[in-house]
Each structure stands twice: as structure tokens, then as C-alpha cells.
């Protein structure tokens, strides 16, 4: 949907997926007692995913731009399925599927001297999700927000860009393995912390 006079764009969609023999990441105990657990892609039985997504772009002035997006997945679950070691996964949520994904960005441009400075501040939010199919708190990531900022100045052939990712140094996990039954431990790979950088370029 496009509103030219107000420089407004809006898109929305509904989706429904019905998978057969879907490949899903599994952190699965071995059939052999005391053996190393298996971390593999497994063909599971049926699974269904449905939800909605929408995004908006709005420029109320030539200098100001607003972007916002949201995704909602209320259902992303195994249908009837028992794994090879006899654990029922029926109605468990699929790994890495947050119920909510929300993002937004606010940008503003300034004319300074003979150049243009464009600043932006944005965020990405994910609600809680599980890293494997067993749906335990030991392999779960709570909801978190990552903020980012950017300030770009361009004048003639010069361009300078100051940026930051994970601006507030949010701690979150990129991946977790529940190894309590094998090694009595939880393997936790943390996501990247705050990063700040400066890029300068010159066009000949």
C-alpha cells in the first residue's frame, strides 16, 4: 500500500506453512548409554507454522524517515512426533522460532557546511525462543533488544561514517547446548558485544 502524498508505504502479509519431513536442528541424547550426544539435522514428521508480518516506511519531511516492522508467529510446532530415543516432541515449539520479531529505525538528515549529515538510531527485538527441540530452560534464550546507531557525513568526494552495533552491550546467547546428562554442563556461545567503528572513504 502506497500513499505518495504523505511518503508512506505499508506492507502486510499472512502466511501458513504445512511441512512434511521438515529438517530440524536436534540436540539429541545417544541411544548408547554414556556416549556423546548427537547434534544433527533430523527429518521430523509434520510441523505447522503460521503468523503475520507487516512493515511501514514513513517520511513526514525530507529530513525525517521512520521505519517499523513486526512479525508474529503464534504457532510453530511439531505435530505428532516421537524422536529416535522415545521422547515425545508433539506440540513442542520448533527451535529458533520467536513468537515476536520487531524492528524499527529513526533517521534524520542535516545540511552542514557543504555536506550532509545523516544520523540514525534503530533496534531489533526478539522474544524468547529455544535452541533445540526439548524446550527446556537450559537451552532457552529470553527476549532481548539490540540497538544500533549510525552517523554518516558526506561532502563532495569524502564520506565518514561512525557506527555502533549492540549499542548498550546487551548480553545474549547465539547458541546453547544442554550437555547436563553427558558432561554435567551447559555449552553457551555468547552473541557479539558492543562494537563501535569509523569508516572513511574518498571517491576519485
Image (cartoon, helix red, strand yellow):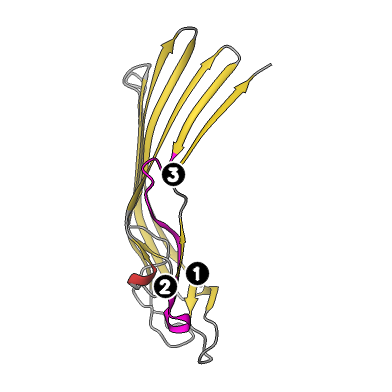
Coordinates of residue 28 in the picture (x, y in percent): 48, 79
Coordinates of residue 192 in the picture (x, y in percent): 47, 50
- The residue at 47%/83% (across/down) is 182
Q: Which label was assigned to residue 3?
A: none
Q: Quadrant of the N terminus?
A: top left
The answer to if 180 sits in the magenta stretch is: yes
Q: Which label was assigned to residue 194?
A: 3
Is label 2 in contact with label 3 (beta carbons under 8 Å)? no
Coordinates of residue 34 in the picture (x, y in percent): 51, 90
Q: Report the front residue among 81 and 124.
A: 124
Q: Is 1 situated above or below 50?
A: above
SS label for mark 2: loop
SS label for mark 3: loop
Q: Which residue is mark 1?
A: 25
Which numbered mark, 2 or 3, is in the foreground of this view?
3
Is label 2 in contact with label 1 (beta carbons under 8 Å)? yes
Q: Report the front residue among 91 and 125.
A: 125
Q: Is 150 situated above or below 130?
A: above
- The residue at 53%/23% (across/down) is 160
Query: How far apart are the alpha carbons under marks 2 and 3?
Result: 30 Å
Q: Could you classify mark 1 by the number of other residues whose Cα lies within 10 Å: few (under 14), some (14-19), or many (20 or more)?
A: some
Find residue 131 and report its image quarter.
bottom left
Q: Given the current orientation, which residue lies at the most extreme right position? A: 204
Q: Which residue is mark 2?
A: 133
| Magenta-drawn segment | 165-186
- The residue at 65%/18% (across/down) is 203
Of labels 2 and 1, earlier in sequence is 1
Query: How far apart are the alpha carbons under marks 1 and 3?
Result: 28 Å
- The residue at 52%/81% (across/down) is 37
Amino acid at each position: 500500500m502506497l500513499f505518495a502524498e504523505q511518503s508512506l508505504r505499508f506492507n502486510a502479509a499472512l502466511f501458513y506453512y504445512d511441512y512434511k519431513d521438515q529438517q530440524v536442528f536436534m540436540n539429541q541424547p545417544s541411544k548408547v548409554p554414556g556416549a556423546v550426544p548427537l547434534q544433527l539435522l533430523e527429518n521430523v514428521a509434520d510441523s505447522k507454522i503460521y503468523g503475520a508480518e507487516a512493515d511501514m516506511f514513513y517520511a513526514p519531511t525530507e529530513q525525517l524517515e521512520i521505519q517499523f516492522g513486526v512479525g508474529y508467529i503464534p504457532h510453530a510446532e511439531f505435530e505428532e512426533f516421537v524422536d529416535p530415543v522415545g521422547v515425545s516432541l508433539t506440540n513442542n515449539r520448533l527451535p529458533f522460532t520467536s513468537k515476536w520479531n520487531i524492528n524499527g529505525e529513526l533517521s534524520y538528515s542535516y545540511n552542514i557546511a557543504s555536506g550532509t549529515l545523516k544520523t540514525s538510531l534503530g533496534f531489533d527485538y526478539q522474544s524468547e525462543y529455544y535452541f533445540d527441540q526439548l524446550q527446556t530452560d537450559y537451552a532457552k534464550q529470553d527476549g532481548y533488544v539490540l540497538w544500533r546507531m549510525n552517523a554518516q557525513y558526506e561532502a563532495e568526494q569524502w564520506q565518514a561514517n561512525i557506527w555502533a552495533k549492540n549499542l548498550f552491550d546487551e548480553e545474549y546467547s547465539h547458541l546453547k547446548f544442554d550437555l547436563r546428562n553427558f558432561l554435567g554442563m551447559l555449552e553457551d556461545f555468547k552473541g557479539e558485544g558492543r562494537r563501535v567503528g569509523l569508516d572513511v572513504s574518498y571517491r576519485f
